[in-house]
Image: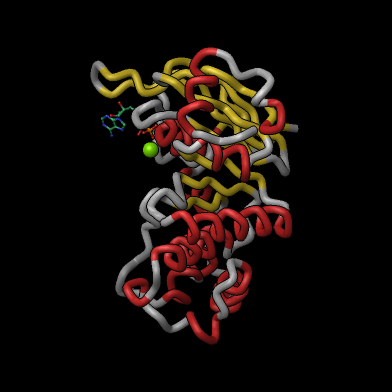
Amino acid sequence: MALIRIEGAEKRYGSTVALDGVSLRVEAGDCLGLVGESGSGKTTLLRSINRLTDLDAGRVLVRGESVDTLDPVSLRRSIGYVQQDGGLIPHWTCLANASLVPRLLGRGDATGHGRRSLEAVGLGPDTFADRYPRELSGGQRQRVAIARAIAAGPDILLMDEPFGALDAITRSEAQEAFIALRKSEGVTAVFVTHDLGEAVLVATHIAVMRAGGVALEAPARELADSATGYAAELLEKSGVAL
Ligand code: ADP
Ligand code: MG
């Protein structure tokens, strides 16, 4: 069973068409890389999965259930979400940030979950638990954002250009950490990026978006073979050797 199914998703903002009939599915354990230029609809699509955006038409099924029928707050707490800018609470420590969702869920040992998730993203809690986001590097801040997203052990993780603002070396380390984490936790993920090279590295499947639609969909390994038209152009621009 597909853990996430998107069927004919449509969304407009005034006269802007953000999503123009998108259908996609993500099987349990897979990572879908959503690639496309700025404005192609990636964030809108991602946020329709946890109902931060409601669609005009079409539907999204999570774990076999239409999200329209689910309580949006419970749905959001059951899905890890890393926003484009990390979205950490600046006046909370790393541990308080990382423990947020287990605490909201009323879990007994919220802090224990937070510490374990900091550990899982490679931030030793003895060193990092009491630091504030401003006391971290950009890469470390994004790791805390990921720790927060996984602390309650969600089966689904949504990532919106999580490493977009990082320098090349930090980014490469963060990508490796994410790959290792996805394997160890067995989490199903949707990973948004405008960098096809990054998508090919971290994802199992790729959907290339253009102007609110899916221009191409392929297993990450086969992308090179099916690269025609816009995907070839993106491939070329990304400079990735496949
Ligand atoms: P991407 O993440 O690929 O850059 P988005 O999903 O953010 O694309 O945006 C798709 C289109 O929808 C863009 O043209 C964007 O300007 C528009 N859009 C997104 N969110 C809003 C909003 N809240 N209000 C108005 N327009 C929006
Ligand atoms: Mg976006």
Expressed as whole percent of the image width and height from the top left, the position of residue 152 reads 59, 62
Q: Residue furthest bottom?
A: 126
For residue 103, say whether it is visible: yes
Query: Which color scheme does this rendered protein use?
Result: secondary structure
Question: Who's the residue at 53% across and 27% down the image?
Answer: 235
**Is residue 214 depicted above or below 45 in this figure?**
above
State the residue lying farthest toward the top: 229
Q: Position of residue 91 (x, y in %)?
A: 30, 74
Tell me which corner region of the image, top left, top right, bottom left or bottom right, holds residue 191. Answer: top right
Rendering coords of residue 112 (x, y %): 60, 78
Question: Could you say which quadrant of the image residue 118 lies in?
Answer: bottom right
Please tell me whether residue 44 is drawn above or below residue 52 in the rendered image.
above
Could you say which is closer to the camera, residue 118 or residue 64? 118
- Please tell me which residue lies in front, 66 or 12: 12
Picture quarter with the C terminus: top right
Q: Is residue 45 left or right of residue 24?
A: left
User: Please, which residue is most extreme toward the left here?
Assistant: 14
Q: Nearer the viewer, residue 109 or 28?
A: 28
**219 or 56, which is in the foreground?**
219
Q: Residue drawn at (71%, 26%), measured in percent from left and top?
A: 222
Residue 168 sits above or below residue 38 on the image: below
The quadrant of the image that shows the N terminus is top right
Q: Quadrant of ligand 2?
A: top left
Which residue is pictured at 53% across the width and 45% down the height?
A: 158
Residue drawn at (51%, 34%) of the image: 239
